[in-house]
Structures are given as C-alpha cells and as structure tokens.
Image: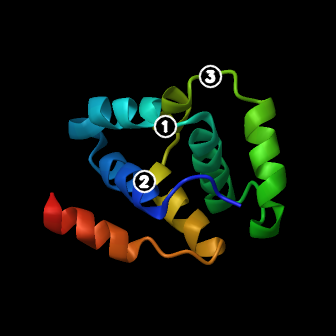
Amino acid sequence: MLDISINKVANVILMARELGRAEGELRAFIDRLSTEEKLSLVAIMWIGRGSFEPEELQEALDTAEAEATTPTADYLIGSPLLSDHLENGLDALGLSVVDEEDDLIRRG
C-alpha cells in the first residue's frame, strides 16, 4: 500500500520534467514529504524502472527503508528518467496519474 497521494506523485513528475528550471522547487517538495511518502516515492520509481514487480511493492518499500543512506531528494534527482519511471511505476500498480497531471498543468 502506498503512503503517498497520486497528486503528490504528479507534482514530482511535473517538476522532474522541468528539472533544469525546477530543481530547487522539486528538492524542497521532496524534503517536505513524510518518511513514508518518501519511501513510497522511491518504491514507485523502482517498480517503474523494473527493479521490482508490482506485486513486490512491500519488498520495495522495505528495501527503500533499509537502504535509505542518501537524502531522498538527492537520490531521486540523480536518477535518470525519474518522471518516466514514476509514471511507469504507477501504471504498473494500476494507478493513473494523467488526471492529476492535467489538473496541475491547468492550475499551474
């Protein structure tokens, strides 16, 4: 079970797409997340890049917690294709981020 809202993941995806312009904003956003939200974000990214299967979500969450030695923002921002991996991870988990992204873009 994920401990982060789809809306927050959508925010990270949109900021990651504009990393050159929004890195500071993305870093601050991630830093404000709870520990559980950060672990969920890392697990979604790992599922999206194929490190874990969707049915291994709990294992991904446990691994994210056990291996958290780098600040989450540093780790995620340093990950190539972050936005793609997050979208793919949500898709693999049967969750869609499209409506939330569209709402954020309209409001943006």
Q: Please tell me whether residue 25 is drawn above or below residue 70 in the rendered image.
A: below
Judging depth in this view, the residue of 48 and 38 nearest the camera is 38
Task: Label 2, secondary structure: give it.
Answer: helix
Quadrant position of residue 94:
bottom right
Tell me what residue is drawn at x 26 percent, y 47 percent: 18
Residue 90 against residue 108 in the figure, above or below: below
Mark 1 sits on what residue?
33
Question: Comparing marks 3 and 1, which lies closer to the viewer?
Answer: 1
The quarter of the rendered structure image containing the N terminus is bottom right
Judged left or right of residue 81, residue 62 is right
Name the spot of residue 106 as percent of width and height, x first.
16, 68
- Residue 51 visible somewhere in the drawing: yes
**Residue at the (81%, 43%) spot, across then down:** 62
Q: Which residue lies at the image location 20% right of the left edge and 64% below the top edge?
A: 105
Within 10 Å of disc 3 (Cα), the crowding (few <14, some 14-19, many 20+) is few
Task: Give the residue pinned by disc 2.
Answer: 8
Q: Amino acid at mark 2?
A: Lys
Query: In the image, residue 79 lies at what x, y percent?
Result: 53, 40
Mark 3 or mark 1: whose residue is earlier in sequence: 1
Q: How is the image coloured?
A: rainbow
- Mark 1 belongs to which amino acid? Leu
* Residue 83 locus on image (x, y percent): 44, 55
**Quadrant location of the C terminus in the rendered image:** bottom left
Label 3: which residue?
A: 70
Task: Determine the secondary structure under disc 1.
Answer: loop
Instruction: Indicate which disc residue 50 carries.
Output: none
| Disc 2 + disc 1, Cβ < 8 Å | yes
